[in-house]
């Protein structure tokens, strides 16, 4: 870690495992935001979690209901999703339309 004033202010640049090493050559320069935007304390970093969806249509058929009821349950399942992630197709069943909605 790189320490600023105490060990509590440490900034971890890289974590290494046992028997790993890194070769680093660096030049440190202090600057201010008036000089260049790269010295500005604000940053534009963000992250987003991407969902991993796995839809198994076989679970609808395992209920033991008649085919008409199974199709009705599929349509109700699709309609119950407030973000409209799923769609219903009579030939293919329930499908994932847009997982990022």
Image (cartoon, rainbow, N blue to C red):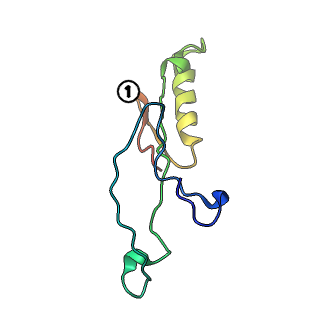
Q: Nearer the viewer, residue 39 or 68?
A: 39
Task: Pick the residue in front: 75 or 6.
Answer: 6
Q: Is 13 rendered above or below residue 55?
A: below
At horizontal 58% and vertical 65% (from top left) the residue drawn is: 4
Disc 1 crowd, CA 10 A, few/some/many (<14, 14-19, 20+): few
Task: Tell me if residue 52 comes above or below residue 32 in the rendering.
Answer: above
The answer to which of 12 and 87 lies nearer the viewer is 12
Mark 1 = which residue? 92
User: Which residue in the rendered view is the most extreme toward the bottom?
Assistant: 34
Q: Secondary structure at mark 1?
A: loop
Q: Nearer the viewer, residue 50 or 74?
A: 50
- Image quadrant in which you'd find residue 7: bottom right
The answer to whether residue 95 is left or right of residue 8 is: left
Number of disc labels: 1
Residue 73 at what x, y percent from top left? 57, 28
Q: Where's residue 8, x and y in %?
A: 67, 58
Q: Is residue 98 above or below residue 52?
A: below
Residue lying at 36% horizontally and 82% vertically, measured from the top left: 36
Residue at position x 45%, y 78% in the image: 40
Residue 53, horizontal then vertical, whole percent: 48, 34
């Amino acid at each position: 870690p790189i320490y600023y004033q105490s060990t509590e202010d440490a900034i971890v640049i890289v974590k290494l495992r046992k028997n790993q090493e890194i070769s680093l050559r660096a030049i440190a320069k202090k600057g201010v935001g008036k000089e260049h935007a790269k010295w500005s304390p604000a940053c534009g970093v963000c992250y987003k979690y991407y969902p991993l969806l796995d839809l198994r249509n076989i679970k609808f058929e395992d209920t033991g209901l008649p085919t008409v009821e199974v199709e009705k349950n599929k349509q109700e399942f699709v309609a119950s999703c407030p973000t409209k992630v799923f769609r219903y197709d009579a030939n293919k069943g329930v499908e994932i339309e847009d997982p990022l909605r």
